[in-house]
Amino acid sequence: MVPTDADDHPAAQSDKASVPERIEIHNPSVNGALADRGACAHVHLPTGRTCVLPLHHPGSCDFVPADEVPS
């Protein structure tokens, strides 16, 4: 059997047009729900605090407690 490339699937092509690829979302140090809304969303694992600044923001992250992350 010949391996297939998932990127050639039509559904994968339509998804790429609407959502920018963020492979780091599958990393436990990124809050996926917040990242889907365009935030940096990096999680400081020892404290559980999450960065709420926009993706690719300049400078350091602004980590806030989980209960203060905008919903």
Image: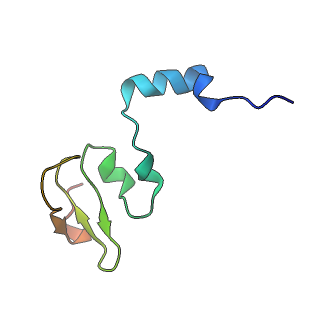
Residue 64, image quadrant: bottom left
Up/down of 53 relative to 62, above or below:
above
- Where is residue 68? Give x, y as percent: 18, 66
Residue 28, image quadrant: bottom left
* Residue at the spot 34% in from the left edge and 44% down from the top edge: 36
* Residue at the spot 87% in from the left edge and 30% down from the top edge: 1
- Residue most toward the left? 59
* Residue at the spot 16% in from the left edge and 49% down from the top edge: 57
- Where is residue 48? Give x, y as percent: 31, 74
Q: Nearer the viewer, residue 66 or 16?
A: 16
Q: Quarter of the image containing the C terminus?
A: bottom left
**Horizontal side, residue 26 vs residue 52: left or right:** right
Up/down of 3 relative to 46, above or below:
above
Count the labels in the image.
0
- Residue most toward the right? 1
Q: Nearer the viewer, residue 22 or 48?
A: 22
- Where is residue 40? Give x, y as percent: 25, 52
**Horizontal side, residue 3 vs residue 47: left or right:** right
Q: How is the image coloured?
A: rainbow
Up/down of 28 relative to 57, above or below:
below
